[in-house]
Amino acid sequence: MKIKTEINSKYSEIELHICHNEINDEVKNISSELHMMYDKSFIGTDERGNRLVLRPGEIVAFYSEGQRVIALGEKERYIISSKLYELEEELIKTYFMRISKSEIVNIRKIRSLDMSISGTIRIIMKNGHETYVSRRNVSKLKERLKAERMALKA
């Protein structure tokens, strides 16, 4: 892989170009990671009151807790001002998916699925967070995971 930096006054903002002679897994992964890192960001407040910029790729899940929306990172929780429905609209074309009325998860952060409970799925995230898919979203999750697997094979 070659990385080239070009400084020129014709650019008013940073542009990233991925060039190759074919679309392969490496190209897809690089493109996907760049989109996750730079397309969206959120302002979160940690438990000490510090305000931080959060990138979607750093987030494991968003969930409601009382009247607040929490962004769950790998190790910390952050309070954000967005509503879950707003997050769902913003993240619809990324690796996030609404799994219940109160939670949106990053499907790339899923470690395992437990389907032993009749009619629902328990999700264990890579950071150890456990959650459940509502019955109405089970088939949507299965379809989404199947589509992701097929996209990775293409």
Image (cartoon, helix red, strand yellow):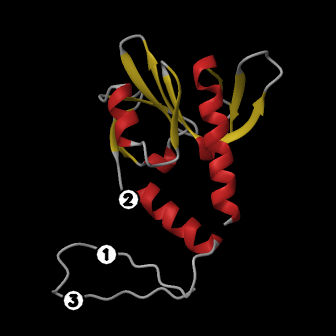
Which one is in front in this view, the residue at disc 1 or the one at disc 3? Answer: 1
How far from the left and from the top, in percent, is residue 99?
A: 56, 27
Q: Nearer the viewer, residue 46 or 87?
A: 87
Say if mark 1 contacts mark 3, CB within 8 Å.
no
Ranked by sequence position, the earlier of labels 1 and 3 is 3
User: Extreme right residue here?
Assistant: 116
The amino acid type, in three-letter code, at marker 2 is Tyr
Q: Residue at x 62, y 73 (%)?
A: 26
Task: Name the N-terminal-most of marks 3 and 2.
Answer: 3
Identify the element where label 3 is drawn: loop
Residue 52 visible in image: no
Residue beneath disc 1: 15
Q: CA distance from mark 1 to mark 3?
A: 11 Å
- Residue 21, located in which quarter of the rendered image? bottom right
- Report which residue position mark 2 lands on: 38
Up-down relation of residue 72 to residue 12 (above or below): above
Amino acid type at mark 3: Asn
The N terminus lies in quadrant:
bottom right
Q: Label 3, on which residue?
A: 8
Residue 69: horizontal and vertical position, in percent?
A: 39, 23
